[in-house]
Amino acid sequence: MDYYHDERMQKLFEVLEQPKSLDEIDLSDSFIKNLILKIISTYGNIKVSQISEITGLHMDILEKVLKSLEKDDLCAQTGGSFLFPSVEYTIKKKGHEKAAQLIQENPYIGMAPVSYEEYFKIMGVQLKGRFPLKIPQEVIEKALKGVVGVEEGKKTLVASAIGGKGFFIYGPPGTGKTFLTSKMSDLLPPLLIPKYVEFSESVIQFYDPDFHKLRPEQPKDPRWVKVYAPFVFTGSELSTEKLETSYNPNKGVYETSPIIKANGGILLLDDLGRQKEDPNAILNRLIVPLENKKDVIYVKGAPAMVHTHFIPAFSTNLEITIIDEAHLRRAPLHILLGPPNPDEIVEVFKKNLDSMHEDYDDDVLERFKMVYLPRVEGGEQLKPTFAHARDVAQIAQAVRIRRGEERITVEILEEALEQHVLIALQRKYTPELFNRIITQQK
């Protein structure tokens, strides 16, 4: 059985067939009629096929609703062939007036949402008994294939994924904390989530393409999407306010917080301790969602319970003692990442060049390694980070393109190294003074 499409997922796909009638769909007739009327009014003239693309509603549902709107003198056909999808509709005066009122009350125009009851039921089925997981060895190997070194960190990451336990990941900047944590998305099973949910005639947005990566296989009901386990990350900009669901008046939707978007996956609080607020105040906001696996959001003052079944990951460059013991208990695992050794950073540098399809001379890798080797071995003994490997590779590519060369040479690498700000600072100052400068910048 495919780990990413197991028996439970197959059964859910069978359940999530596209509704073909008003009796089958989990939305009220009035909500669907209002949604379609707002769309026609907004576009002026629109084909039925376009309405179907926008809403995800089956043609049979659209035909029944549009005929009803015509009968009520709210819209009218203006053209098209005998094929219903190509028929064009326009708004009438009475329909325009009603649509204007509807848009003022609820401006949402887009994909038809899923009912709150349907969302809660389908999500509950997926999350029940989710842990402990049995992750196939081939899935683990494929997920962690691109991670160089950090063998103990990989073991802890897999343990976290198996048991659903949170973890702290800490160490100096540039050691790959965010990169390693992001690999958990491929270790966890995928999830079916609604794009939008209707609650008390309002619309809540659940799907966020920035954090929800689509799987190749998708259910027939386009209101749902199958995604990899989400990897949601926040940084120094995080505040307790941003952990709340907020209403977007321009889109007419309630935009869910990172806590809800991370449901079924991982929520990484990056750079913990760099936020303007006390990190423990931010972590206090997570206590209820972590304990109950659910949280309450308020839609026009009405409470709605939502699923928050995520694994917390907390990343920091600071001392882990800044966190209260109560919060450490909720993320009992830990990963300490130290600076990579020269061989590891060269391997990552090579991977970056290869991924960009760059040709390079063999001695380019040896020259890059010398930057980090001890002085007793003829090197520069600079402090290595995985971020250097990525950045220098990209800068070298830019230098090659500017010069009009076909491949990256040692000369091109030298120019790239000179242009990298952190390498330039390390070359200019003693390690003590360099660390002091970087600390002051932070």
Image (tube, rainbow, N blue to C red):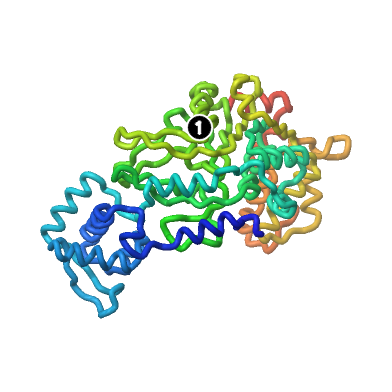
Quarter placement of the C terminus: top right
Residue 387 location, x and y as percent? 66, 42
Q: Residue at x 67, y 57 (%)?
A: 355
**Direction from residue 438 to residue 217 in the image, left or right:** left
Residue 217 location, x and y as percent? 54, 62
**Direction from residue 223 to residue 181 in the image, left or right:** right
Q: Residue at x 36, y 52 (%)?
A: 113
Who is closer to the viewer here, 294 or 439? Answer: 294
Is residue 103 visible in the rendered structure shown here? yes
Amino acid at the residue labelled 1: Pro
Who is closer to the viewer here, 438 or 192? Answer: 192
Instruction: Tell me the residue that label 1 is attached to.
Output: 289
**Badge 1 element:** helix
Quarter placement of the N terminus: bottom right
Residue 150 sits in which quadrant? top right
> In the displayed image of the protein, which residue is found farthest to the front?
23
Residue 330 location, x and y as percent? 61, 28
Q: Residues within 10 Å of mark 1 (few under 14, many from 20)?
A: some
Q: Residue at x 15, y 65 (%)?
A: 71
Residue 174 sits in which quadrant? top right
Who is closer to the viewer here, 432 or 331? Answer: 331
Residue 335 location, x and y as percent? 71, 33
